[in-house]
Amino acid sequence: MFDFTAQAVDPSKESPVFPSTLPVEVPLGIALFIILYVFIAKVVVPRFEKLYTERQNRIEGRIDEAESLQAQAQQALENYQEQIHAAQAEAARIRDEARAEGNQVLAEVRAQAKAEADQLIMETRADLETQRVQVKAELGPEVSRIAVELASRVLGESAADVEADARRRGTIDRFLAERG
């Protein structure tokens, strides 16, 4: 079939670019290259294409899943922030209501305490006035008698005269009424 023995060729007649005879390795190399090319093109490349496509689909699926999870996380974060803002607003509202209610209760307690204090002061003044009138009524004649007695000692006159005594008492009572 093929003769793999080297043929003797005159080196002076042979062109270095285009030899006169082709060595046997060249057609064999071309045939093996074609077989290898067909094998790679029909078997290896489709498998790599399939693996590449599967990997690309898997990566795209993971990217889509990651984007979906990121959107869910963003939505959850926004919901959380809305809840925090709502809770802060509610706390501020409750605090303001409590402050207003506390101020109202404080004002009511102060008003009630002032009313009770005013009532107590009025009652105490009324009691004092009643006691003053009572003491004046009880001690008035005694004071008149002591004043007449003291005046008679100072003046050296006798206080035996009843009429004079009554007159003096009337004068003293008028004096005390004007002062009192």
Image (cartoon, rainbow, N blue to C red):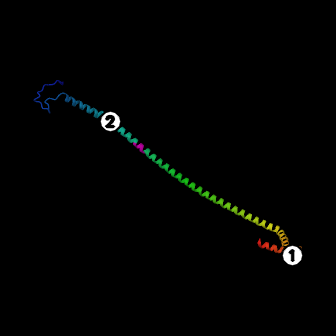
| Residue furthest to the left | 13
Name the image quarter holding the N terminus: top left
Tell me: residue 173, above or below residue 18: below
Residue type beneath disc 1: Ala
In primary-sequence order, the first of circles 1 and 2 is 2
Q: Secondary structure at mark 1?
A: helix
Q: Residue at x 63, y 58 (%)?
A: 106
Asked whether, in this view, residue 43 is left or right of residue 30, the answer is right
Name the image quarter holding the C terminus: bottom right
Front residue of 88/136: it is: 136
Query: Distance from label 1 to label 2 (Cα)?
Result: 150 Å
Q: Secondary structure at mark 2?
A: helix
Residue 2 appears at what percent x and percent y?
A: 18, 25
Q: Residue at x 31, y 35 (%)?
A: 46
Asked whether, in this view, residue 101 is left or right of residue 20, the answer is right
Residue 94 appears at what percent x and percent y?
A: 57, 54
Q: Main secondary structure of the magenta part?
A: helix
Residue underneath mark 2: 48
Q: Which mark is residue 70?
A: none
Residue type beneath disc 2: Phe
Categorize mark 2 by other alpha carbons within 10 Å: few (<14), some (14-19), many (20+).
few
Q: Which mark is residue 164?
A: 1
Q: Residue at x 34, y 38 (%)?
A: 52
Judge depth for marks 1 and 2 and give the one in front: 1
Asked whether, in this view, residue 82 is left or right of residue 62, the answer is right
Categorize mark 1 by other alpha carbons within 10 Å: few (<14), some (14-19), many (20+).
few
- Kindly indicate the quadrant of the structure image that contains residue 149: bottom right
CB contact under 8 Å: marks 1 and 2: no
Tell me: residue 55, above or below residue 160: above
Front residue of 88/64: it is: 88
Q: Which residues are magenta?
A: 63-67
Front residue of 18/97: it is: 97
